[in-house]
Amino acid sequence: MKPSGRAGVQPATPALPTRIGWQGIRFNAPPDWFLKGYSGDWREGFLQVGSPHSAEIDLKWTRSRRKTDLTYVLQRFLHKLERAKHKAKHPFTGTLRPVDEHQIEFRWRSDERAVGRIIRYPEHHTIVLIQLRSASKHDALHQLARPIFDSLEVAPDPDGWIEWSLYGLHTAAPAKFRLEKAQVLTGHTRLSLRWREERLIIERIARAEQLMKGYDLSEWADHWLRWRHWRGVRETFQWGDHDTGVHLRTRLPAGVLLAEVLLTPLRLRLPAWRVRAVAWLCRARNTVFHIQHYAARDSNLLEEVMARTVCC
């Protein structure tokens, strides 16, 4: 009898891939891989994803309407890398293989090995360079890299939304919103997004039941999420079969609103004086998700972001 056929033993469930979504770039990494670092903004930036072993993904992107020679960009990248390796007294060899006018595959070998692609997405005026590298001589890089590279996407979804996904926070926001500030930790992830005067804050807090010990969710939101500074209507609700939440509807304090009113006439826009917030406990993951939306008019954006925020 096979081990999986014994009484009380279930066949192993294939592990889901790790979804990485950042600045409109998204792809699937192997299970247990994680974000190691990032820099830049929507127009140009860098992302690094690590594995529990020796492999890492490096990804660079540029958004520009200028015509760019992919071969020239890739050769500059490899030349800079070659100089760094030679400076460290390591030999370096690299090869390029054009796939079509919008894609070139490459590989290089030094103290590490790497395979990669540079891809132009002409409809979205975006160029992405992605490589998988490893210090191990035994990793099957091509086999590991292909599903990662093939999952790469840069286009918003049909509704004009983009994914933000890292460290257990898997959500989405309209593509017009730009990242203002981020706090990215394994236990606490917070994204602050903005479009004109409109603001959207999406937050994930791990180990929630331990942090909430002795408080109900509404009391905890007042202290931990600083809702106590807001005067407004609080309503509790049920989310799914097992999860609970609290919703806050309020407006900017008088002093803050006055400052916004003095600034916004220069911009010919209404201030984002209406504030709505929601926090709910996802028991399956022992996590609290928290969303705030600041807008000039009534909107259902809060509900739409909440519906796109994955609990399990």
Image: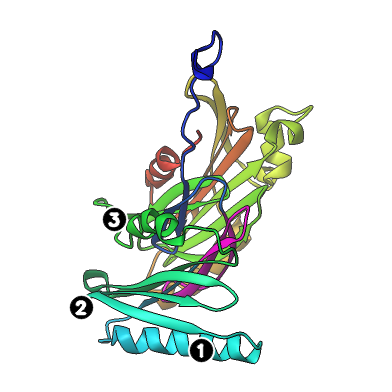
Q: How is the image coloured?
A: rainbow
- Label 3 – label 1 distance at C-alpha: 36 Å
State which quadrant residue 89 falls in.
Answer: bottom right
**Magenta part of the protein: which range?**
34-57
State which quadrant residue 25 falls in.
Answer: bottom left
Q: Which mark is residue 160?
A: 3
- Label 2 – label 1 distance at C-alpha: 23 Å
Chain-order first, disc 2 or disc 3: 2
Q: Which mark is residue 80?
A: 1
Q: Which mark is residue 101?
A: 2
Q: Identify the residue at image location x=75%, y=29%.
A: 215
Camera-nearest residue between 192 and 26? 26
Q: Which mark is residue 132?
A: none
Q: Identify the residue at image location x=46%, y=61%.
A: 141
Disc 2: CA contacts within 10 A as few (<14), some (14-19) or many (>=20): few
Chain-order first, disc 2 or disc 1: 1
Three-letter code for the amino acid on which mark 1 is drawn? Lys
Three-letter code for the amino acid on which mark 2 is drawn? Glu
From where the camera sits, is residue 201 visible?
A: yes
Q: Identify the residue at image location x=75%, y=36%.
A: 211
Residue 290 is situated, as x and y percent measured from the top left of the image, at: 57, 43
Chain-order first, disc 3 or disc 1: 1
Question: Farthest residue in the right direction?
Answer: 214
Between marks 2 and 3 in the image, the one whose residue lies nearer the viewer: 2
Q: What type of secondary structure mainly makes up the magenta span? A: strand
Specify whether residue 36 is painted magenta. Answer: yes
State which quadrant residue 155 falls in.
Answer: bottom left
